[in-house]
Image: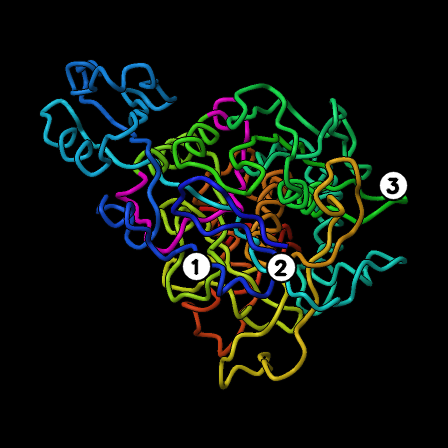
Amino acid sequence: MTLRTDRPSRAIALSLTPAAALCCLLILAPSAWARSAGTARGVRAPRVIVVRYAAGVTARAGGARASAAATNRPVALARTRLVRLAPGESLAGELRRLRARPGVSWAVPDYVAHASNALVPNDPGSGPAAGDWTQLQWNFNGPAGVNAPEAWANVAADGAPGGRGVTVAVLDTGVAYANRGRFRRSPDFSRYEFVQGYDFVAHDSFPNDHNGHGTFVAAAIAESTGNGYGLTGLAYGAHIMPVRVLDSQGEGEASTIAEGILFAVRHGAQVINLSLEFSAGVTASDIPELIAAIRYAHRHRVLVVAAAGNEGHAAIAYPARAPDVVSVGATTEHGCLASYSNDGSSLVLVAPGGGPDADLPGDPNCRPELPSGRDVFQVTFLGSSPRRFGIPGGYEGTSMATPQVSATAALIIASGVLGRSPTPDQITERLRATARKLGGGDDERLYGAGLLDAAAATAPTAAATIAG
């Protein structure tokens, strides 16, 4: 199936079919209205403007027109407001007018991100398999996996089994964390593993999942383990903070994601997982409110981990491309870069995401002529119902790779190998220094520092060399 949005958006839709490339081309084709706005760079712009005012300047003094007053509201970032255009108002014209005002620091369209798992092949793959978890979760325990069992042993010896005591915020489509109305908690989550989150889409305190993507991501981090049911989570002892910033179609505005980051930082998250991406045309100057929120997280010693993107481009998508973010690419069951995974000089490392190998001549692990490797598996929705759970096939992408890095960061923090309160830069350097080289060994644009190794990252013997 393919999930689409029926409102104007510059984001590609959350696609779960092998026709993703065609889907992306169709959605990225600019409409006449988007072209006239002059801001979308080939993607469609919304009718909401994010305005940042200079210190001491009010919204009225800064040029917010009366016609927009009813929809002019503040956001969490100081001196920043959202202005929704009235019918008939020109986005390009209003942007020019606001930017010309001396009291306005910047004004940008409220860009839309989308969940980046995007790619699901239509062939059955291995399918949901009964039996031992090791037969299904190759990404945790296979030759091209992250060495989860050894990592679990390391942190258990440190007195923090499964990353106990660390909080990871999952900013996504919500999480199946509680029974409420039509929603059900995933049967492989304990109600005790969640801390209070928030729904920035519905603006309430109940961030239930409306899609399944967020539940998958949260399960990769902290699915219940050792309970005789389902699969395992890499940091199964950590707490999850569910923060809903993407709607049921897997899309969310930059300002909403920024609010989610600020909430997570202010409510005690130590790691923030962003399994989402913006379309290729979106740059840092288009999403200043989100870049500011990421900087805020970094200043407050919170690590932000984000998906590199699934278009197979030679450039990392935002927000993963932003400074102070751990950008995560995806690899296959064969240890090759996945064909869909974006790469580039800002890539930090890779983790298992599943799917087909990229065509990289000379890389001994890449055999694109052979059948694709398996998907990644966790317990999440079966279909679209928030009441039915299982182990579906079809999840592959940098969205699946990213939470494995977030979980490993939680294990590093819990283990104490970098001290009691490591900085984001120290954790990032630990992840890089302990990653396993792939390809020819010097392929940093493709693989960053290499493949995530949770066991090496949590091993006490390596601490002295990278803890500075």
Asked if residue 384 shows in the view, the reply is: yes
Labelled disc at residue 26: 1
Question: Label 2 to label 1, Cα distance in Å?
Answer: 22 Å
Disc 1 to disc 3: CB gap under 8 Å: no
Residue 276 drawn in magenta: yes
- Residues 262 and 145: in front is 262
Left or right of 118 in this view: 293 = left
Tell me the amino acid under the disc marked 3. Asn
Which is closer to the viewer, label 3 or label 2? 2
Mark 2: which amino acid?
Answer: Glu
On the image, which quarter does residue 136 sit in? bottom right
Q: Which residues are magenta?
A: 263-287
Whether residue 462 appears in this view of the structure is no
| Element under disc 2 | loop
Above-or-below relation of 248 to 139: above
Distance from disc 1 to disc 3, alpha carbons, whole Å, reads: 45 Å
Closer to the camera in the image, 278 or 138: 278
Q: Which element carries disc 3, helix, strand or loop?
A: loop
Question: Identity of the amino acid at label 1?
Answer: Leu
Can you identify the residue that label 2 sits on? 396
> On the image, numbered disc 3 is attached to which residue?
227
Q: Could you say where residue 160 lies in the image, as x and y percent from the top left?
A: 71, 37
Q: Residue furthest front?
A: 88
> Quadrant of the rendered structure where residue 384 is?
top right
Q: Position of residue 20 (x, y in %)?
A: 53, 62
Q: Is residue 97 magenta?
A: no
Residue 125's image quarter? Answer: bottom right
Residues at discs 2 and 1 in contact (Cβ within 8 Å):
no
N-terminal of the pair, mark 3 or mark 2, is 3
